[in-house]
Image (tube, rainbow, N blue to C red):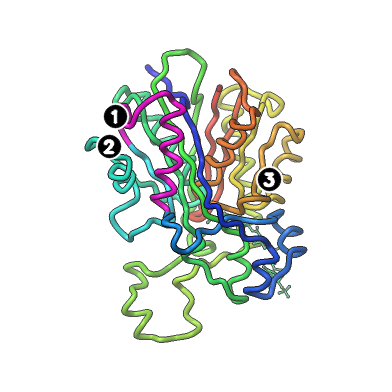
Amino acid sequence: MYSSKITGLGFYVPENIVTNDDLSKMMDTNDEWIQERTGIKERRWIKEGSGDSTSVMGAKAARKAIERAGLTKDDIDFIVFATLSPDMYFPGGGVEIQEMLEMPTIGALDVRNQCSGFVYAMSVADQFIKTGMYKNILVIGSENHSGGLDKTTRGRNVSVIFGDGAGAVVLSRSEEEGKGILSTHLHSEGKHAKELVLEGPSTGRWVPEIIENNDPDDISYYPYMNGQFVFKHAVTRFSEAILEGLEKNGLKPDDIDLLVPHQANLRIAQFIQKKFKLNDDQVYNNIMYYGNTTAASVVIALSEAWEKGKIKDNDLVVLAAFGSGFTWGSVFIRW
Ligand code: ACO
């Protein structure tokens, strides 16, 4: 049986920096509240007219990943694209990437698992490689949150958290034993679907119905989050996903060289760090500068950590995520 390893990675974020002070001009919020509760100092939001979109950013990150893998677009056999903010209701973003990168008619699959999207996408790609079906898979996470947030005081508990950006990796077939993806672990608990949700537009909350009701209090087309409820579940599920991978691979927390947690809230990452007694060098966070970029967050952080030389050959790298669904999971990698 083959294993899969990351051979190239890259990320792209829009140039436009939005600071907490910028947000305080749009809504009743302030830098102190945002930093204290979330750790976020600034985020990137797509500037109107820049041409960026979820798929455009995904394609930019993907080009870097392919080049760094020493491959060309024609070497890619399959695309797995994770996002909750696709350019179109349908089709998904994967086919847009296939077209933007002028790739041959390879398959493209979209993953709809919000903040766990990239972890799920990596697991899907890993299975295709292990079975021998594909050799090189492009795995992308990309989000355009700024296009769909309530940027008034009404939406402040959600809108100050989210940022735009994309990241991508090339996952390639490997025959090196004990290297690459060691295991992946995926979970969900749909009973909490409505605790972190964007209901409409959807077939359950269709546009004509929203327009017809003309209800100024109907904000079902903006994201809703029960923040404290999500926070409590996040810390528990993050820990479980990491423990599960450690047990499966016969490892201890101290064996982790780099934990790359989903950048949901710096307080969540700090809680996990303390729980597993990891030092600062064992955890990579960049939510301070990008906010929560959902399906892109883990891969942006992984790429940035790699660019900064924080990942060495043979390191144990752990990716972990939790988000809307609820969904959560982890990926254990021997680099
Ligand atoms: N600025 C100023 N005040 C605010 C803001 C803001 N942006 N937002 C909320 N407040 C106020 C509230 O109105 C409330 O005021 P009150 O006490 O007078 O009623 C007060 O601040 C406290 O609000 P809480 O919601 O209780 O604040 P909390 O400490 O829980 O922080 C947060 C909110 C940051 C959202 C936190 O709950 C959190 O991070 N939750 C988890 C997020 C997460 O993990 N999401 C998963 C991934 S996302 C995905 O999957 C798409």
- Between 206 and 62, the residue placed more toward the observer is 62
- Between 197 and 326, the residue placed more toward the observer is 197
- Spatial separation of the CA atoms under disc 1 and disc 3: 38 Å
Left or right of 105 in this view: 135? right
**Residue underneath mark 3:** 269
**Residue underneath mark 2:** 103
Left or right of 110 in this view: 7? right
The stretch drawn in magenta includes residue 57 = yes
Q: Is residue 249 above or below residue 140?
A: above
Magenta stretch, overall SS: helix
- Give me the disc on residue 21: none
Left or right of 170 in this view: 79? left
Discs 1, 2 touching: Cβ within 8 Å = yes
Q: Amino acid at mark 2?
A: Met
What are the residue bounds of the magenta stretch? Answer: 54-78
Find numbered disc 2 in the image and state the secondary structure of the residue it sits on: loop
Q: Is residue 74 above or below residue 235?
A: above
- Spatial separation of the CA atoms under disc 1 and disc 2: 6 Å
- Give me the disc on residue 74: 1
Please report the residue visible at 42 percent of the width from the left and 21 percent of the height from the top. Answer: 3
Q: Amino acid at mark 3?
A: Ala
